[in-house]
Image: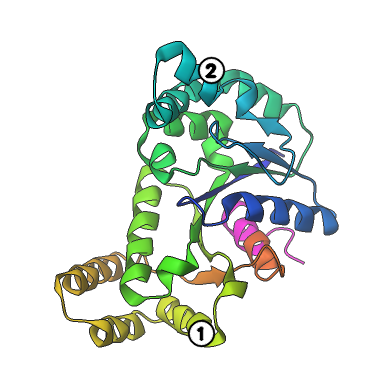
Amino acid sequence: MAAKNLYFVGTAGCGKSTLTYAFQLWMQSQGHDAITVNLDPGVETLMYAPDVDVRDWVEIEDIMKEYGLGPNGAQIAAADMMALNIKEISDVVAGFDTDYVLIDTPGQLELFTFRQSSKIIVEELGIEDSALAFLFDPSVARSPNGYVSSLMLAATVHFRHPVPMLLLMAKADMLKDDDKELIEAWSRDQYSLFASLLDESKDAQTSVSIEFLQALESIGAGRAVVPVSADTGEGLEQIYSAVQLALQGGEDLD
């Protein structure tokens, strides 16, 4: 049976790398084998040693020197160069006998979302065996408009990569209990979110947020957000259960 690919996606600083490592440790503690893949060529340090590291093929500093690019231009060039090397990277990943491949994506969300190279990467690694875990940043998503902005980003990623997606409230241990309960209520009941948006303000941003929510509701795209914490382990079992349900129809759910 082919390994399952789980991509951790989100904005810079939302905790993708930390959660990737924490979920690998949890998987191993449950008797499941999981390897990690770092797809961020620009990351300087990682708290874990990835089993497969794109920096072995693509180095930001080398690109900057060779092509005379700044950091941002080098990141874009690196994203495209990853696609050129993806067959070799894929062969290395396939050489592992593992249940799960946990993929830590670039800190710059737009590189994974909008570059054609990322679609090539997902397809080469096996799109039919892939799922996305989109991380909400609690510093943004604790307000109603910030929460809707996070939903918009998640919807954009899902539109570009139409594979099963789960929504995670990262760093849930940093939220106050009241904030966590409110966010969970928003994810379960859009009318609760409508009410909070109207309570917060009645400006142009709120009008856009409400229109976006109504559009999501009309296509049935609303889904629950799972609070997770790499520090406390909260939600890690739910990640596993959700991915198993999405990719294997719930097989091996103990």
Residue with the mark numbered 1: 181
Specify the quadrant that holds the N terminus.
top right
Q: Determine whether, in the image, residue 190 is placed left or right of residue 83.
A: left
Point out residue 70 in the picture as x, y percentages from the top left corner: 39, 26
Q: Quadrant of residue 49?
A: top right
Residue with the mark numbered 2: 62
Specify the quadrant that holds the C terminus.
bottom right
Q: Residues within 10 Å of mark 2 (few under 14, many from 20)?
A: few
Q: Secondary structure at mark 1?
A: helix
Q: Quadrant of residue 142?
A: bottom left
Point out residue 8 in the picture as x, y percentages from the top left corner: 56, 49
The amino acid type found where label 1 is placed reads Glu
Visible residue check, residue 84? no
For marks 1 and 2 on the same chain, the one whose residue lies earlier in the sequence = 2
Which residue is situated farthest in the top direction here?
A: 66
Q: Determine whether, in the image, residue 186 is placed left or right of residue 234.
A: left
* Nearest to viewer (mark 1 / mark 2): 2
Residue stretch rendered in magenta on the structure: 241-254
Residue in the image at 53% along x and 33% along y: 42
Residue in the image at 43% along x and 25% along y: 74
Query: Vertical placement of 173 versus 135: above or below?
Result: below
